[in-house]
Amino acid sequence: MRNLLFLLLPLLLQTAVSRADDYATLHESKIANPMLWADVPDPDVIRVGDTFYMVTTTMHLMPGAPVMASKDLKNWETVGYIFDRLTDSPKYDLLEGTVYGRGQWATSLKYHDGRFWALLAPNESGPMGQTYIFTAPKAEGPWTVHARLRHFHDATLFFDDDGTPYVFFGTGEMCQLTPDLKGVVDGSLRHYFQREADERGLLEGTRVVKHRGTYYALLISHVYGPGRHRREVCYRTTDLRAPKWEKQVILESDFGGFSHLAQGTIVDTGEGDWYGIMFQDRGGVGRVLTLSPVRWIDGWPMLGDEQGRVPDVMRPYRSGMPERHIVCADGFDAPKLGLHWQWNHNPVDDAWSLKERPGYLRLKTSRVVANLYLAPNTLTQRMEGPTCSGSISIDISKMKDGDCAGFCAFNGDSGVLTVKKKGKKYFLEMSEQKVSLTDREKAVTSVDEKVVETIELTSHLLPLTSHLHLRISADFQPGHHDAANFYYSLDGERWQQIGTKGYRCVFDYRRFFMGSKFGIFCYATKRAGGYIDVDRFDYQCPAE
């Protein structure tokens, strides 16, 4: 027996190690909710072959309508944008108003007849709000405008099995498009359901799928009656012309210490499993994405676990995929700006460069403006939970008198680190800034700026190094008040905190309607022509 145990021991050890490795692999590759703990609202997700593609809302940021890709529903990366800029109004250029909280909303993504299709309607009135239909041979682009139609609120494009195109939009409205997708079929506009008396809020964010001969329209319901919460509802029919569709609540779950979540879609895998992807409002970080299993019960796609709740952790759909992210560090060494960056409104193309000083991003002042919220070429990336930390290294030696440059937690309420050049002196300020906008034009009426702390960057320090290092760290964990802290360094190693301790990042749907972003800026208040060179953007999530 002793000899047998001796012979079996290596095999037993190998089996134990293998099981431990399997457990470690599962633990490392698990999908923890939120699936994307960042501002990724209004998602639409499709699968083409072995790849999942997702679009999301980024409103006034350019390029717009980001397309993200994943092989495993865990690791996502931005692979393209549906448009570089919108040009329907000078407001997109921060002239004659702004498009804060407007612009591109709730894009629908489809794959049909070997091409990708996207439908979106800017949240505007008049010609600016006309619906765009874009198409591309591949998700990465290039995308071209195929048609412009009337405004369809929170719409989804849908191709039936025979190729007939439809648009579902608003609260229970639909219409048929012409075969070339360039017009609406006369007489096809109708309501496919009427809102019940207790559905006092909008039902919106429509997504439509067809499964085993049944059409399913998924919408968010905003009812907040006694015992009722924000939830995802589903209408179904086997005949698009049916006078009455059946209705079911398919998700009504709070999650992670925050209120109930809804709005998104469901998507299948090549093996026939289904997943639900819904967003949840989470304060200053924005609207985050959650992943849930879909259980088909009596022909309804019920989201969540057996208790109908969003799970804390999901088993990965596919293991062994390389790690990918939608927020990335950058040394600015590539010939093109990385797809993880977006500009605040349309950029001024001749006022930034990656070529004039290789290895640096040069941000030039192009016109005189009054404040950060009107500054062209503010470059942004999302902030992420549970905690994150971003820092930049900038060469400030070519700033002109009156120039303002720096790093911020950018939103309608912003925590801002600003280098100001006054005459020949440089000052570093940490301020709290709050913008007021008109409701219609989103014009900036005022900026309430509270300077919390100012440091003079003395002349005996700057000749030693023209580089200044700025850092913002944020904590979006439940109960931690979306707190951001601000730091500076003259050597990139010894950091000093400055200004407000625990500045609260705020989500405000009346102004920006987005989560907080890291923002790098440089603008002139007296005369154009100055610039900064950004050496790098460093990033950690979770924050170290």
Image (cartoon, rainbow, N blue to C red):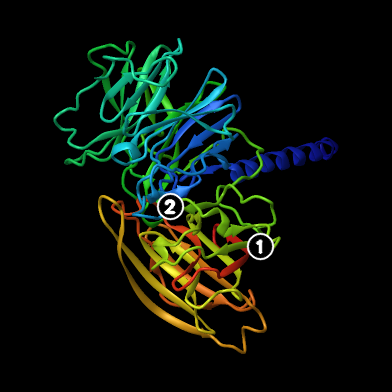
Q: In this rendered view, identify the residue nearer to me: 298 or 419.
A: 419
**Residue 462: image location, x then y, percent:** 62, 83
Q: Residue at x 65, y 38 (%)?
A: 321
Label 2: few (<14), some (14–19) or many (≥20) C-alpha neighbours in 10 Å: many
Q: In this rendered view, identify the residue nearer to me: 121 or 484.
A: 121
Is residue 394 placed above or below 78 in the rendered structure? below
State which tag comes first along the sequence, 2 or 1: 2
Q: Residue at x 43, y 52 (%)?
A: 93
Q: Which residue is mark 2?
A: 93
In this rendering, would 491 be left or right of 257?
A: right
Q: Secondary structure at mark 1?
A: loop
Question: Circles 2 and 1: CB distance less than 8 Å?
Answer: no
Work out which residue is located at the far bottom of the displayed protein and give it.
460
**Residue 353: image location, x then y, percent:** 62, 58
Asked whether the viewer can see residue 325, the reply is yes
Quarter in which the C terminus is drawn: bottom right
- Label number found at residue 360: 1
**Location of residue 57 (image quadrant):** top left
Label 1: few (<14), some (14–19) or many (≥20) C-alpha neighbours in 10 Å: many
Q: Mark 2: which amino acid?
A: Asp
Q: Residue at x 41, y 68 (%)?
A: 415
In this rendering, would 42 be left or right of 423?
A: left
**Residue 235: image location, x then y, percent:** 30, 22
**Location of residue 186 (image quadrant):** top left
Q: CA distance from mark 2 to mark 1?
A: 24 Å
